[in-house]
Amino acid sequence: MSYPGPLPSGAALTAGRSILAMKRILLIWLLLLQRTAVADGPVGGDDWKYDIVYLKKGVIYRGLVYQRGGGVRMWCILRNPGRPAVFYRVDFSENEVARVEMLPDEEHEKLRQRFEILREEHRRMPDPWKAIESEETVIPGADKIKLQETSWPDNAQTKVLVYRSTHFELESNASRRIVVVAAEQLEQVYAAYARCLPPRAKGRPTTILLPQSRADYQALVRGQGRNLLNPAFFDPGKNQIVCAFDWQQMSEELKRIHNEHVKLREKVTTCEAELRKAYKGDIPAELKAALVEQCRRIQAAETSNQETCARARQRLFQRLFHEAFHAYLLNFVYPPRDGELPRWLNEGLAQIFETAVFEVGELRIGHADRERLEAVRRALAQNTFLPLTDLLRSKADQFLVAHNGDKQVSDRYYLASWALAFYLTFDRKLLGTPALDTYVRQLQRGADPQEAFCELTGQPLAKFEHAFLHYLNHLRPDGHVDMK
C-alpha cells in the first residue's frame, strides 16, 4: 500500500506502524498473486416462452429476437430456479441460420416486457467489488440464489457455503455476499463458454473451492505437492479447482490504511491550526505549500491503494475464470477420450475468457485485452513474435513456468496463443464448428500439426499467417479491425 510522505518540520505525524514492514508484506502478497453430437444452446428452465433460432450447424438458441433481415439479432436468455438470470446478445448472418420460430405477436410482446424488467434489474446491479464490501448495498436477486452448507474436503471442522449449478459446484468459507457474487459471475462466464463452445459431452460438474484466506488455501493444498506460490490451479484428476480468494483480507487492509489516512488528515488540520496561531493567521508560503503537498500525497496514496486493490481483486476473478475454462473444456467439450484441444488453443481461449467484462448483467468477451494487444504490437515491431510453425508444434512444456529463466519463453507462447485464439474465434469464427472437431480428431490420430491446421483454415500456412499478422496490426482494443 502507498503512504504519503512526512509532514512539515515541527509536525510529528506518523502512520503508527512501520511503513517498511507494510511494504514488505504488500510485496510478498503481490508476488503470490502474480503468475499466473452437439448439445442444444441455452434454454430457459422456467415458464417463459421464447423465440427460437436454429443454426445450420445444429445449435439452438432461445431468447428474444429483436431484429431480422440481413441476419438475426437476439438476446439469449437463461433463467433457472435457484440461479441468477443470464443473458447476452448474439448476431447471426443469413447463411448461418436454418430457420427462426417467432412467438405470436402477443406472446412476443409479453416476452419483451418481461425481459426489459430483467434488464432493468441488472442495470441496478452494483459493481461486484462494492457489492461485496458494503453491507448496505443490496445485491438484486441474491435472495433467489440457493446456498447450502457442507464441510471442506478432508476437514469436517470447517463449514462452507455451497452453490450448485449445471457445470460447477462452488464451495467457499467466505461470507455469503462473496459467495453470491462469485456464483453470479461464474454463471455468466460458463454461459459464455457454452456460447462459444457448446457442450459435446455429458461431463461432471467441477468442484470449485474458494478459501477466503491465504492460510486456508495453503491448508487445502498442503500435501498435494503443489507450488503454494501459485494462487490457483485445476486438478483434472479430482475435477477440482482451488483458488485463493482472500478478498476480505485485502478489503480489511485497505480499510485499515484508509483509517490511518483519516488520522493523518486530522493531524494536518491540527498542524495548520497551530501554525496559524503561531504566525497570527499569516502562515509563511513555504509552510503553507508543504501542508498542501502533504494533503496531495495523502490523496495520491489513497487513490493508489484503491487502484492496487481493484486490480488485485480483478485478478482473482481472472484466475478463477482461466482455470474454470480448462475444467469446462475437459468435462463438457473435448474430454480426453474424444481428443483434446492442442495446448496452445486451450491456453489461448482461457486467456480470452479470463478478461471477460461484465456490463449491465451481460458478459462481453469480444474485446481485445489492451495489455496483451500492446505486447503483440511490440513483438511484431521488434520481430520477436512467435512464428506460427513454432506455436502449432508446441508442447505443454512451453506453457510451464518452473523457473524464472523459463518465463520469457513461456510469455512468447502465451502471447501468441492468445492472439491466434482471438483471431480464430472472432474473425474466422471457427469455434464450435465441425471443422474444429475434425482438427482435434486428426491431432489425436497423430496427424502433422501444421498440415491439420491448414486443413482447419482452408489455407496454406504462409497465406494464413500473412492475413493473421495483418489482422493483429489493425486490431483495436474494442475488438474491431481498422483496415485503413
Image (cartoon, grey):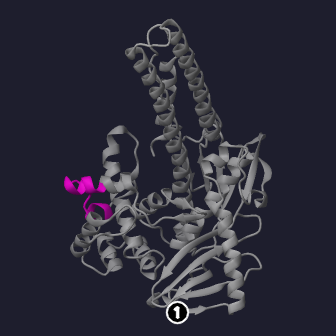
50 relative to 318 in the view: left or right: right
Q: Position of residue 72 (x, y in %)?
A: 51, 85
Q: Position of residue 458 (x, y in %)?
A: 31, 81
Q: Is residue 62 visible?
A: no
Q: Is residue 151 above or below residue 237?
A: above
Q: Residue at x 54, y 49 (%)?
A: 233
Q: Nearer the viewer, residue 306 or 420?
A: 306
Label 1 element class: strand
Q: Main secondary structure of the magenta part?
A: helix
Q: Residue at x 58, y 91 (%)?
A: 100
Residue 385 included in the magenta stretch of the image: yes
Residue 182 included in the magenta stretch of the image: no
Q: Residue at x 52, y 52 (%)?
A: 318
Where does the magenta region start and end? 376-392
105 relative to 312 in the view: left or right: right
Quarter of the image that includes the C terminus = bottom left
Q: Position of residue 214 (x, y in %)?
A: 60, 36
User: Quarter-wise, where is residue 479 in the image?
Assistant: bottom left
Q: Nearer the viewer, residue 53 or 115?
A: 115
Q: Is residue 102 visible?
A: yes
Tag 1: amino acid = Ala
Q: Residue at label 1? A: 98
Q: Position of residue 448 (x, y in %)?
A: 31, 71
Q: Nearer the viewer, residue 295 or 354?
A: 295
User: Quarter-wise, where is residue 88 in the image?
Assistant: bottom right
